């Protein structure tokens, strides 16, 4: 007798680095993105949606150099043998779109985009391979006025999302200041040693807020041993070079004007450094004139972002408050960034096209809002119309339809006629109200409205079961024609 073949059943599992999300988080994200998008649109930015896939050679950062180009991106080969990759950000597709439609587009071209991006990178705690970005960019407008607008737009976005003024700051630096610093410190060589040394210097400066001046000085010099005993090699600068780098990074003053005064003296002999100082001064002056003082937009020389990517001002949106988790303070830090990138469209057009943009880290901003406002708090579920009689389903659907027509969420229970199971279902759905109409109510032309929210609260306070049975203010009866008004009034009480 032939052995019965075992049916293959795949294991239910999610790919590494990806995650499922449920209603409360999705609803919070949608609400936040709607507020941010409204700010973008109010400033004249038009929505643009590009495909999830781009040709791999158009992405720029991850060019194919092997038979299968998958470093950093998820790629596949089409039937025409061309490689395509899932987009890793929303800026590379924008550059392709602008280059492809350059003559037809108005210049400057102002667009915003919201959508998922994918990174073929090693996942870790809070680090996923798919996440959402929310960008705004101006292409075709030179510095500094477009940069100033973008910094102010960033501040407006933070407040629209729910971060109160005083709880965030938009930090601004300029790639040309960093280039001028390296140039005047003797680190402008093009050899491998100089390139590695510059990278070590920039990485050290990026750790100033965490390691302090002493720790950064060590990394600029011979190196540093951390608390675990691990040793990190330093940049090997001599004391005079270290002093100059530290003078620069600690030049941030209480006011943007004073910071620019210090920088002007520091870069007196650097043409590229002075160009950055002039633009920083113009951005700060325009922002201050429009009410965006240092409490919202601040020049901060410790901000290091993508030196090879950006060509001018860079921005970072930083959360200032420190919530506690398990009795320990948590630094939320940056929830978005951006800057000027005049060279991205050049890959397609052969000439520089000025561009500046910002990108909101949606997941990080949502996490910050969750600490502050309980953003993922489970929202109210739909009104549940109980289905007690199989031959009256049309009546139940009519009730739900009337509620939906009035702008309310409502559904009919479709899992059977067991009364207890229906109420249990309503509880799991976080339903605020259940609608009940059995034969008794129908004969009287009435419906019973069960206020589930109030009932749950009252049940916590009433220990005497008899009193609970005899007095149920959370359940009442109204005429069938008054159903919608009665439900609205009940929901309005909860909203208050």
Image (spheres, rainbow, N blue to C red):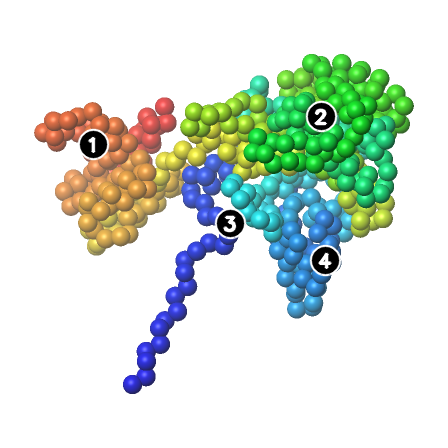
The mark that comes first in sequence, 1 or 2, is: 2
Quadrant that contains the N terminus: bottom left
Label 3, on which residue? 18
Label 2–label 3 contact, CB within 8 A: no
Instruction: Indicate which label's residue lies in the foreground, 1 or 4.
Output: 4
Instruction: Indicate which label's residue lies in the foreground, 1 or 2.
Output: 2
Question: Mark 4, residues whose alpha carbon is within 10 Å: few (<14), some, or many (≥20)?
Answer: some
Q: CA distance from mark 1 to mark 2?
A: 73 Å
Indicate the secondary structure of the residue bearing disc 4.
loop
Indicate the secondary structure of the residue bearing disc 3.
loop
Determine the residue positioned at 51% across, 49% down: 18
Question: Mark 3, residues whose alpha carbon is within 10 Å: few (<14), some, or many (≥20)?
Answer: few
Instruction: Indicate which label's residue lies in the foreground, 4 or 2.
Output: 2
Q: In this view, which residue lies farthest toward the left?
A: 466
Label 1, on which residue? 476
Residue 169 percent location from the top left of the image: 62, 23
Residue 311 percent location from the top left of the image: 79, 36
Determine the residue positioned at 19% across, 45% down: 420
The mark that comes first in sequence, 2 or 3, is: 3
Label 4, on which residue? 64
């Amino acid at each position: 007798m032939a052995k019965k073949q075992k049916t293959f059943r795949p294991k239910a599992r999610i790919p590494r680095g990806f995650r499922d999300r449920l209603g409360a988080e999705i609803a919070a994200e949608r609400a936040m993105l709607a507020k941010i998008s409204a700010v973008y649109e109010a400033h004249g930015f038009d929505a643009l949606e590009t495909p999830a896939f781009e040709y791999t050679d158009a992405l720029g950062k991850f060019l194919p150099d092997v038979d299968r180009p998958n470093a950093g991106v998820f790629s596949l080969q089409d039937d025409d043998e061309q490689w395509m990759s899932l987009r890793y950000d929303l800026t590379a597709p924008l550059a392709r779109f602008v280059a492809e439609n350059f003559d037809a587009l108005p210049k400057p071209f102002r667009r915003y985009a919201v959508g998922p991006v994918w990174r073929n990178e090693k996942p870790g705690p809070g680090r996923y391979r798919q996440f959402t970005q929310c960008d705004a960019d101006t292409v075709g407008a030179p510095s500094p006025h477009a940069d100033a607008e973008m910094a102010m737009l960033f501040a407006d976005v933070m407040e629209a999302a729910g971060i109160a003024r005083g709880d965030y700051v938009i930090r601004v630096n300029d790639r040309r200041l960093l280039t001028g610093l390296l140039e005047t410190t003797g680190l402008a060589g093009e050899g491998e040693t100089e390139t590695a040394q510059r990278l070590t210097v920039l990485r050290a400066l990026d750790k100033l807020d965490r390691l302090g001046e002493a720790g950064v000085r060590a990394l600029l010099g011979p190196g540093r041993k951390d608390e675990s005993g691990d040793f990190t090699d330093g940049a090997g600068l001599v004391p005079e070079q270290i002093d100059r780098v530290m003078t620069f990074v600690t030049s941030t003053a209480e006011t943007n004007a004073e910071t620019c005064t210090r920088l002007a003296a520091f870069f007196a002999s650097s043409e590229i450094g002075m160009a950055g100082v002039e633009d920083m001064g113009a951005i700060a002056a325009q922002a201050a004139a429009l009410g965006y003082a240092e409490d919202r937009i601040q020049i901060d020389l410790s901000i290091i972002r993508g030196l090879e990517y950006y060509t001018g001002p860079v921005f970072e949106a930083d959360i200032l408050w420190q919530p506690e988790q398990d009795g320990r303070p948590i630094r939320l830090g940056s929830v978005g960034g951006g800057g000027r990138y005049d060279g991205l469209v050049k890959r397609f057009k052969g000439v520089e096209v000025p561009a500046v943009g910002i990108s909101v880290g949606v997941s990080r901003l949502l996490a910050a809002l969750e600490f502050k406002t309980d953003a993922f708090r489970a929202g109210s579920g739909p009104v549940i119309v109980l289905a007690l009689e199989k031959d009256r389903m049309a009546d139940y659907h009519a009730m739900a339809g009337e509620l939906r027509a009035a702008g309310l969420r409502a559904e009919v229970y479709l899992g059977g006629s067991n009364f207890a199971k229906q109420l249990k279902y309503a509880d799991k759905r976080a339903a605020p109200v259940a609608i009940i109409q059995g034969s008794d109510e129908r004969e009287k032309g009435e419906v019973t409205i069960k206020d589930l929210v109030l009932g749950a609260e009252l049940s916590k306070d009433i220990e005497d079961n008899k009193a609970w049975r005899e007095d149920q203010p959370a359940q009442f009866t109204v005429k069938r024609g008054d159903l919608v008004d009665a439900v609205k009034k009940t929901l309005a009480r909860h909203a208050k």
